[in-house]
Image (tube, rainbow, N blue to C red):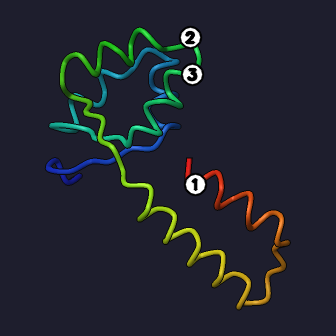
Amino acid sequence: MPDRELVVSDTSPLLNLALIDRLDLLESQFLSITVPEQVWNELTEGEDGLDSLRNLRETELLSVVEVEQSDLFTEIEHELDALREAGFWISDDLYSRILAKVEK
């Protein structure tokens, strides 16, 4: 049985259900769904499924929260460093570009 108290979603599941007009499946499984603001921005970039997604948010089943970038920045920097220490080659340019994107 899924944990009905806290559900956090990424873009793909919500977008795919919106595209096939089956966001109603979420209501039967979850009390609420939380997405980071960045995920909401990705979901609303295109037109496909947009009306269904907006309706889901208006019903308050879907809530959008702001995620502090500093925590994300620190976590990604740590993961990049761990990859380098494990022998993965990541150029300084790519390393800097990834961290710059996270800071936005």
Measured Cα–Cα span from mark 1 to mark 2: 25 Å
Q: Amino acid at mark 1?
A: Val
> Which mark sits nearer the N-terminus, 1 or 2?
2
Badge 2 local density, few (<14 within 10 Å), some, or many (20+)?
few
First in sequence, mark 1 or 3: give its number. 3
Give the side of residue 89 with respect to residue 35, left or right: right
Q: Quadrant of residue 84?
A: bottom right
Q: Look at 29% across and 31% down and name the residue there.
A: 26
Q: Is residue 51 above or below residue 41?
A: above
Q: Is residue 52 above or below residue 13?
A: above
Q: Which mark is residue 87?
A: none
Please state which amino acid type lies under the numbered disc 3. Answer: Glu
What residue is at 30 percent from the left and 13 percent from the top?
55
Q: Residue at x 21, y 28 (%)?
A: 61
Question: Considering depth in this image, is 4 or 87 the residue closer to the camera?
Answer: 87
Judge the density around disc 1: few (<14), some (14-19), many (≥20) Cα neighbours within 10 Å. some
- The amino acid pointed to by label 2 is Glu
Q: Position of residue 99 (x, y in %)?
A: 64, 61
Secondary structure beneath label 2 = loop
Q: Which residue is mark 2?
A: 47
Indicate the position of residue 90 as horizontal and vertical percent values.
Answer: 81, 74
Separation of marks 1 and 3 at Cα, in angstroms: 18 Å
Q: Nearer the viewer, residue 77 or 46?
A: 77
Q: Secondary structure at mark 3?
A: loop
Proximity of marks 1 and 2: CB atoms separated by less than 8 Å: no
Specify the label residue 45 is tagged with. Answer: 3
Residue under label 1, please give it.
102
The x and y percentages for residue 102 are 58, 54
